[in-house]
Amino acid sequence: MKKRIAVLPGDGIGPEVIKGALQVLDGVATRFGHEFETIEQVFGGAAIDQEGNPLPDSTLKTCNDSDAVLLGAVGGPKWDQGKVRPEQGLLALRKAMNVFANVRPVHVYPGLEHLSPLKSNKVKGADFVFVRELTGGIYFSEPKERNEKRAVDTMSYTREEITRIVEKAYELASSRRRKVTSVDKANVLETSKLWREVVEDVAKKYPNIETEHLLVDYAAMRMISNPTSFDVVVTENMFGDILSDEASVLTGSLGMMPSASLSENGPGLYEPIHGSAPDIAGSGKANPIGMILSVAMMLRHSFQLEKEAEAVELAVFETLQAGYRTGDIYGGSGTLVSTKEMVNQIHFRM
Ligand code: ATP
Ligand code: MG
């Protein structure tokens, strides 16, 4: 099968990890006999430098005309004081692609438990997925106002917006351990009361899936005290923003974590959760695994290539088992390698 992929390297370590991702994708193409057409476009700070716009029209058009989008990272101190910022390009891209569902796996790999702040047995094998609503809620609802004396934010959700994200969570749970944890604040928020109602409605269609409701404050505690109790966690935008950052600490390094942002029918957007890490850009220290696992998510969610996705994940797993470590996951034992060497080791195991 032939697929078209828009590739946006972006800034900082973005281009370095994208290069690794494309090498691994090439390994998938060779092994499984697929053809992937990749089209590279400028985005973020690089695009501001070149065109004065973090999301040039040609970049957006390529994204919309593709089957999926692979993104490195955007931003950096160079653009922090500017009138236009790279991050505006990312928000505009998400909005234009209508990617309302942000999916973030949290997977603690064997051999990396010692990097987790918990280090307890309970973390062993923690493996769950966040499904965060990405385009609504308090970050985007109107009115948003302020004057000298008062500031207002608004949290609003429609039944339709909640239904589509909750459906995604149940679909995902069907192919996993069949449990959905819905996180809300239904004891005080009207949006959360509606959220809970919708979850109950959707749950009726999935009798084989266990459903639980947690208040967000309790969920924040349980993520630390009992992280293996989760399978799929579905929640609104702001709760998901906060909780998924909390959970990322469990895995030992930001550099390990992939993400997918999905729309109803259009292309998905795949990127590691880390930023542009300007402090290590160009030094060969970047961990490419979050980006490479994002390729696995693309294969699975946009192309329905499950075997191929598992092959990438297995190659990552085996490379870690063999002891290869970039600096961010090096705990004093194993073989310390550069970005390039880590990519070669993973590619070699494909
Ligand atoms: P952003 O504002 O874009 O989210 P940030 O400054 O919050 O960026 P990151 O750029 O993600 O955060 O990184 C924070 C630090 O974590 C970096 O400075 C870097 O040292 C480390 N880091 C992040 N990603 C990686 C990676 N892939 N490999 C190794 N170290 C990383
Ligand atoms: Mg950050």
Image: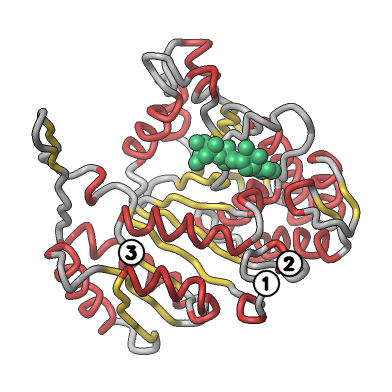
Tell me the distance, in whole angstroms, between the alpha carbons under discs 3 and 1: 27 Å
> Closer to the camera: disc 3 or disc 1?
1
The residue depicted at 47 percent of the width and 25 percent of the height is 59
Can you say whether 8 is above or below 272 in the image?
A: above
Q: Residue furthest bottom?
A: 208
Cα distance between the residues tagged 3 and 2:
29 Å
The picture places residue 51, in percent across and down from the top left corner, at 47, 10
Q: Using residue 143 as the reference point, say whether residue 140 is left or right of it.
A: right
Which residue is drawn at the image coordinates 17% and 56% (left, top)? Answer: 157
Residue 4 in view (yes/no): no
The residue singled out by tag 1 in the image is 119
Which residue in the structure is indicated by mark 3?
A: 235
Residue 174 in which image quadrant = bottom left
User: For residue 283, what is the image quadrant?
Assistant: top right
Q: Is residue 97 above or below residue 306?
A: above
Q: CA distance from mark 1 to mark 2?
A: 5 Å
Q: Looking at mark 2, is its residue's CB closer than 8 Å to ligand 1?
A: no
Residue occupied by mark 2: 114
Question: What's the amino acid at mark 1?
Answer: Lys
The image position of residue 318, as x and y in percent, is 82, 64
**Residue most extreme to the front:** 149
- The answer to whether mark 1 and mark 2 are in CB contact below 8 A is yes
Among numbered discs 3 and 2, the one appearing first in the sequence? 2
* Mark 1 or mark 2, earlier in chain: 2
Residue 336, percent from left and from top = 87, 48
Q: Is residue 213 left or right of residue 87?
A: left
Tag 3 secondary structure = strand
Could you classify mark 3 by the number of other residues whose Cα lies within 10 Å: few (under 14), some (14-19), or many (20 or more)? many
Q: Amino acid at mark 3?
A: Thr
**Which amino acid, mark 2?**
His
